[in-house]
């Protein structure tokens, strides 16, 4: 069953202006449930734009993005936010953690918008921390964490709502090789949990991994394979 | 001195003008949205229209809310103008300074009800993914926009015809002239007031939206006359002071705001479920409960003044 279906997707920036350009051109892509897909390509090829469209962070100029058979490009802004909150886990290149808060508080943040009780919240946060092995740092301020730890904290926050889809934008760009390998171990756990994962990266580390189902190459806003 | 140079009128007309410009911009966009809207399409045009729709909704939500608040400012301004209009002791003199005043006030009230309806339909429309009431919502807004343009013309006519050298009639004349509508007596008015109030509460309990709509509209006029020509006398404790506005003043502890506010809110909640049903086929009968509560507040306050006066003096006015 297809989790994500993209049909004839275009994203035009600066429409009706002399500097108008297509960030995405006629994209057709289907991602199955539980599949891990890598979007490869150089900077400016449109990987991040595609991820932001799949995640409902921005709207396309034309075409469809069906997530669970619903065209999320048509969602009003308020519903788009709710969709992102419950269905999507985002892992950003720069982590986007809430500075000044502890690891636990950062991971708890998405749950604060739910009506869950304290116990249920604590259980979910603990599970997320276990998944990425960061329980021992739970009371530490995120400002004092290493790059790898910060990223694990960001991953835990992305999965704490238990989304079925996880989107990662250049997740290993700010990591050394040791921490990048830790990320790959976490990726294997996602595979075991049957999560649908789309990763935008130009890191060669992802090539030939068993847990990766497919690599898709992008260039100049087009899908090449 | 021109009345257009008074602070209240400058501020009021300037805000009105800004809101009209914003509404006109929205109206231009509404035409293109309604003409080309096809929610199922995934074309660049449709996505552009969806963005435009979001912008228009934001502007309209802001302007419509401002219009509702501006109504209160208008009422307050009328009170302040009594100081510069010769002969006017309260808003009665200012409103009655020419024959545009009462028409303007009635139009404003109807538009407020219309804006309230629009806000509810808009909320329903935005809470659904497919914008099911988009065209009806914008048709309703177009009608309201025409009303707003008419209101603005009426405002200009009204303000420019307020005489500042010739004394106007005010409560002094209202005092002497007990002009009851359709030849009603005070007893008949009060009887109608309480009977209709009881009938509305009953219909509201039975969730009869159409019956409640009809009775509420009727009650608006009956209650206006009953408050002005009967209950008002007990608020002012004067047998001939028949004025709907003086009770808004400090001397009467601003009780008029509560009386008229609860009355208009009660009427609004009473007529909305029927109109919403007509436009959206959605049930909003729970509003009838609020109608009953608000109208009960009106009836209780009005009755309180009569009972208090009787207990204090042993007679009715």
Image (cartoon, rainbow, N blue to C red):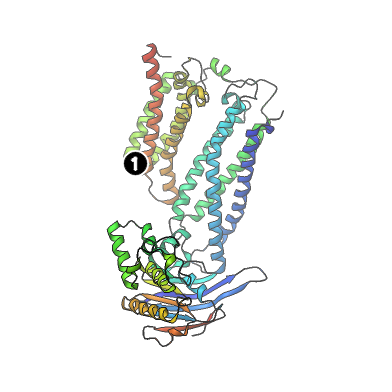
Q: In this orientation, which residue lies closer to the viewer: A40 or B105?
A: A40
Q: Residue furthest front?
A: A144
Say whether residue A28 is left or right of residue B82.
left
Neighbours of disc 1 within 10 Å: few (<14), some (14-19), many (20+): some
Horizontal side of B129 relative to B106 (left or right) equals left
* Residue at the far top in the pictured view: B314
Residue B161 picture location, percent across and down = 67, 29
Q: Which residue is mark 1?
A: B207
Give the residue drawn at x 41%, y 24%: B302
Could you tell me which secondary element the residue under label 1 belongs to?
Answer: loop
Q: Give the vertical position of B266 relative to A125 (above or below).
A: above
Residue sitting at x 53%, y 78%: A26
Query: From this viewpoint, is residue A69 visible?
Result: no
State the quadrant of the N terminus of chain B: top right
Instruction: Identify the residue at the far bottom of this view.
Output: A208
- Position of residue B52 in the picture relative to residue A153 (left or right): right
State the count of labels: 1
Q: Is residue B173 above or below residue B3?
A: above
Percent position of residue A155, x then y? 39, 71
**Above or below, comparing residue B61 to residue B71 in the picture:** below
| Residue B30 visible in the picture | yes
Res. B106 image quadrant: top right
The quadrant where residue B19 appears: top right
Image coordinates for residue B247, horizontal then vertical, percent: 49, 24
Relative to the observer, which residue lies in front, B256 or B253? B253
Figure check: B164 above or below A116: above
Q: Residue at image x 43%, y 42%? A: B272
Q: Position of residue B4 (x, y in %)?
A: 68, 33
In the image, B216 versus B87, the foreground residue is B87
Task: Output the chain of dot 1.
Answer: B
Between A180 and A61, which is closer to the camera in this rendering? A180
Where does the C terminus of chain B fall, quadrant-wise? Answer: top left
């Amino acid at each position: 069953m297809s989790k994500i279906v993209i049909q004839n997707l275009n994203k035009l920036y600066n429409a009706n202006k002399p500097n108008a350009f297509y960030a995405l051109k006629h994209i057709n892509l289907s991602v199955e449930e539980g599949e891990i897909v890598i979007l490869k390509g150089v900077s400016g090829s449109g990987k991040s734009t595609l991820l932001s469209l799949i995640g409902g962070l921005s709207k396309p100029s034309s075409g469809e993005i069906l997530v669970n058979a619903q065209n999320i490009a048509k969602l009003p802004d308020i519903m788009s936010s709710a969709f992102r909150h419950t269905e999507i886990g985002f892992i950003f290149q720069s982590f986007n953690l809430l500075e000044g808060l502890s690891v636990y508080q950062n991971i708890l943040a998405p749950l604060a918008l739910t009506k869950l009780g304290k116990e249920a919240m604590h259980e979910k946060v603990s599970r997320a921390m276990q998944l990425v092995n960061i329980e021992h740092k739970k009371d530490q301020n995120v400002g004092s964490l290493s790059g790898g730890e910060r990223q694990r904290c960001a991953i835990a926050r992305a999965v704490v709502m238990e989304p079925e889809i996880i989107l990662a934008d250049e997740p290993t760009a700010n990591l050394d090789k040791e921490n990048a390998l830790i990320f790959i171990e976490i990726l294997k756990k996602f595979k075991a949990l049957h999560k649908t994962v789309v990763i935008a990266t130009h890191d060669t580390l992802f090539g030939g991994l068993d847990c990766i189902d497919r690599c898709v190459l992008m260039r100049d806003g087009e899908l090449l394979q | 001195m021109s009345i257009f140079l008074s602070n209240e009128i400058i501020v009021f007309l300037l805000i009105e003008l800004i809101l009209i410009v914003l509404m006109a911009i929205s109206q231009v966009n509404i035409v293109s949205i309604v003409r080309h809207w096809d929610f199922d399409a995934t074309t660049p045009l449709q996505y552009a229209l969806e963005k435009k729709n979001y912008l228009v909704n934001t502007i309209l939500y802001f302007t419509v809310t401002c219009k509702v608040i501006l109504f209160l400012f208008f009422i307050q301004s009328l009170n302040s103008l009594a100081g510069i209009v010769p002969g006017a002791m309260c808003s009665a003199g200012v409103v009655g300074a020419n024959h545009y005043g009462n028409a303007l006030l009635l139009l404003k009230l109807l538009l407020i009800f219309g804006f309230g309806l629009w806000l509810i339909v808009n909320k329903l429309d935005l809470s659904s993914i497919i914008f099911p009431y988009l065209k009806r919502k914008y048709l309703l807004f177009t009608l309201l926009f025409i009303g707003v343009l008419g209101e603005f013309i009426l405002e200009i006519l009204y303000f420019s015809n307020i005489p500042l050298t010739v004394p106007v009639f005010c409560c002094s004349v209202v005092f002497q002239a007990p002009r009851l509508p359709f030849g009603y007596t005070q007893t008949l008015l009060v009887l109608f007031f309480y009977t209709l109030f009881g009938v509305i509460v009953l219909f509201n309990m039975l969730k009869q939206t159409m019956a409640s709509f009809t009775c509420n509209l009727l009650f608006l006029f009956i209650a206006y006359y009953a408050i002005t020509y009967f209950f008002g006398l007990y608020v002012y404790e004067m047998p001939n002071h028949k004025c709907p506005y003086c009770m808004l003043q400090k001397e009467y502890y601003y009780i008029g705001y509560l009386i008229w506010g609860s009355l208009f809110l009660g009427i609004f909640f009473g007529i909305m479920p029927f109109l919403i049903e007509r436009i959206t086929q959605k049930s909003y009968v729970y509003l009838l409960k609020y109608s009953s509560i608000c109208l009960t507040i009106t009836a209780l306050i009005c009755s309180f003044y009569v009972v208090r006066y009787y207990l204090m003096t042993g007679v009715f006015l």
